[in-house]
Structure formats: C-alpha cells, structure tokens
Image (spheres, rainbow, N blue to C red):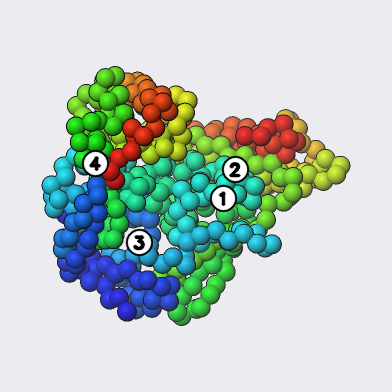
Amino acid sequence: MTEPSASPRPIRVSVNGVDHERTVEPRLLLSDFLRHDLGLTGTHVGCEHGVCGACTVAFDDQPVRSCLMFAVQADGHRIGTIEGMADGETLHPLQMAFWELSGLQCGFCTPGFLITARDFLARNPDPSEQEVREALSGNLCRCTGYQSIVAAVLEAARRLRQAPLAGLGKS
Amino acid sequence: MKPAPFAWCAPATLDEALDLLAGHADAARILAGGQTLGPLLNMRLATPSILIDINGIGELAGLHPDLAGLTIGALTRQSTLEDDPALAALQPLIAMAIPHIAHRAVRNRGTVGGSLAHADPAAEWPALVTLLGAQLLARSKSRGMRLIGADEFFITHLTTALAPDELLCEVRVPPSPPGAGYAVLEFARRHGDFAVAGAMVRLTSDAGGKLTDPRLVLFGTGRRALRARRAEAMLAGASAGTALFAAAAATAATEIDPYDDLHASAEYRRHLAEVLASRALEEALARMNGKRHD
C-alpha cells in the first residue's frame, strides 16, 4: 500500500539522454526541477499555469507543459529540453530557420515554440500556414506578432522534408 | 514552490486507489492529467492536503469498442483519441470535437475523465457525453460500481454527482446511429481556448426524410451543457430545412441561461448560441446527406 507522504523522495529522470538522480519534494514542479535542481535554464517559466507554453518540454517524446507536472511524476521517464535540440554546434533546422528568419526577438518564448514545432512537424511534415498557426496557438509570443515564427516553421518544414535526418534530436 | 505542501501517492492499481480514496475522501484530490488541477494548485486556489496520482493505473486508460458502443477509460489522454485512426468511424462527433480541446501539449496530458469530473460548462467533454447519451461508470469502496447517465452526472458549474470517495473510471458511449450527420461549432477568442459558446448537433432521418431523434446541445452558455429539448422537439419528425433550423435555433437560444463574464455578456452568448446552433444544424444536415465529408 502506497501511503501519501509529503516527504522528499528519490527520483531518476533521463534528461536529453543523461540520467539524473535527485531527491525532491512532491510539490516541486517539473519546470523548477529542470531549472533549479539540474541547472537547465533553457526551459523558461512564464505564466506557470499552462497558458503561455514557454515551459513546454518533451515528456517521453510528447510536448507537455512542465509547469503542470511534478518532478516526481517524471521518475523513470525521458525528458527532452531545448538544451538537447542542437547536435553539438550544429543547430536543429528549426533553430536555424528561427535564427535566419527572425523567429525570435527577446527569446523568452522560443524554447517552448521550438519544442512544440518539432513535435508538430514530426506529425505533419508538410503543413499549411493555417495548420502551423493552429499548432502554435498554445504558445504566446509578445514580440514578433507571430509572422516570422510561422515563416520560420514553414521554412524548417521545407528543409526537413529535403533532409529529414537533420531533425533527429537527442531527447 | 508554487503549490502549497501536499502529501502525494501514486497507487499502481485501481483497487489501491479506491482504498486511498476511502481513507482520505475529505482531504484528497485525484490527480489525473493535471491540466486543470495544476493551475489551481499553482495559484493556490486549491490546497488539498493529499493528491492521489492515478497516472500509473494502466487499467484506467484505453479504448474498447464492442457491440454496446465504445468504452473509454477515464485516464485516456485527449491526444490518444486524437491519434486513433478508428475513432472517426466509431464516434465521428468525438473525433470532430477533440481538436477543439486546448492545445496539443495540453491534450498530451489531459484526460477524458479529468475533463468530465471537473465539469466546466464550456468544456467539450460534458457536451459530448450529454449529446451522445453516454453512461459514466464510477467506483468506490462504499458503493461499489455505479453507472450514472450524463443527464444526472452534471449538477451545475464544476459540480458532479460523484461522491467524495468515488472515482470516475470509464465512459460508455452508445454506438453511432447509421447515417448520422454531426457538427461541432465553437466560438473562442483563440484557437484552443474555452468556448465563449458552442453547439453540437446529431441528425438522423428515416426513409421518408423525416428527422428522427435529433440532438442539439449548447455549451458555454449556462451552468452546464444543455440539450435544447424544445428545439429538438420542433425538429423531430419534421423535414429538414433552413426555415425549420432557424426557428429551432431561435428556440434553443431561449432554453439556455447564459452568464456575463470577462469574455462576453449573457446577451452576446445568447446571440452566439442561436447563430452557432443554426450553422451546426446546417452542417450536420450536409454531412447526413453526404454533401460534406470533412
């Protein structure tokens, strides 16, 4: 029988292919675990109630809001963050397209957009502009007006169709 | 830390979860996908002392089609339904509604049972089970198994017929009638947001072209998703047509009890309800007649 407990408990989580063992309080958010306990500050924390999408990470390869999960729920699972998106010095095609087409200004929302868009293009490699806009509608950007983000995702989609292996990340 | 302290447990079986609920019914909340409870905890609007995390209970997830219809485990994620290629043929209305539910990252965690047990009047699942006449299966140590009709399940805003020690375990959806045409229409400020107002329709007809058992549900327009029964009565046995649909939609708009909030006034919601009902009826008719295949 599992009795409820507020005491810290040990967890083991694979993040970007690296195993981490920590002992955490049950109420520690996954987003804060990544940032504070592991020092992976690329996952940004915006609204902290699931609206802005800035904290989106891949949980067993599926994008989720890391502010709406607890670190204890990641025990035994795989997490992919923005730190695992590039292949060493080689940016992911989505990152390249965001850079070249100004898909970011302040950069706060960018990690969430990239994790969201990577999953979207894996499921829909040849999307229409409208489909891109709907897929990104759960991520807020206050700088760009979205035009350049949508353009970057469409351009990355085009490049990934030509060289699909370039999109393999480490998550 | 954002949430207030709580004790957490993650039972591995349904039986264990029911034991925990029985022992801590007053203090505990069930944590499923966490897409609504999470924000409430983070803002400390909810401060339960115990969370019973049911995400590890595999027997609560999954789809089971049979002759009696489709059984959906309460822990089934919205994205599991979205990605199931068989769903559109089994339950077209559910397949049409899922993309309206929030965003992919939320659908990857959010569960069918969580949405139903939360009972937001603007959410899709309460409207779906109301229109489809689904039965909701709850279990507890004190009452055993209980089947609750969708009409009895939703009491009012955020309030269901579930007892504190009961766990919603599955949804049983009757088979889709042959030849049915469906429609889901919502008005929301941003794709994926909660609907300011929404309408769902199912139409079927007999050999003579008369409508049989028409269903029209409005949501986001009152304390719970509502079958517009007077409008349905106008449609039943009649021949479909634009004038009839306009009259039924106008009647439906008088059956709801809309509210004012930040997003819209009650009167605007009533207006939206009529427009959406009328358009949803037309769309469902086009699909029933094979003139629309999306």
Q: Is the residue A112 above or below the residue B64 in the image?
A: above
Q: Are marks 1 and 2 on the same chain?
A: yes
The residues bearing labels 1 and 3 have C-alpha atoms spaced at a distance of 22 Å
* Crowd around label 2: few <14 · some 14–19 · many ≥20 (10 Å): many
Q: Position of residue B81 (x, y in %)?
A: 51, 50
| Image quadrant where residue A48 sits | top left
The residues bearing labels 4 and 2 have C-alpha atoms spaced at a distance of 43 Å
Q: Provide the residue designation for mark 2.
A: B200
Residue closest to the eye, A89 or A43:
A89
Q: Is the residue B211 above or below the residue B279 in the image?
A: below
| Image quadrant where residue B17 sits | bottom left
Q: Are marks 1 and 3 in contact (CB under 8 Å)?
A: no
**Which of pointers 1 and 4 indicates the residue nearer the eye?**
4
Q: Are marks 4 and 2 in contact (CB under 8 Å)?
A: no
Q: Under tag 3, what secondary structure?
A: strand
Q: Which mark is residue A84?
A: 4
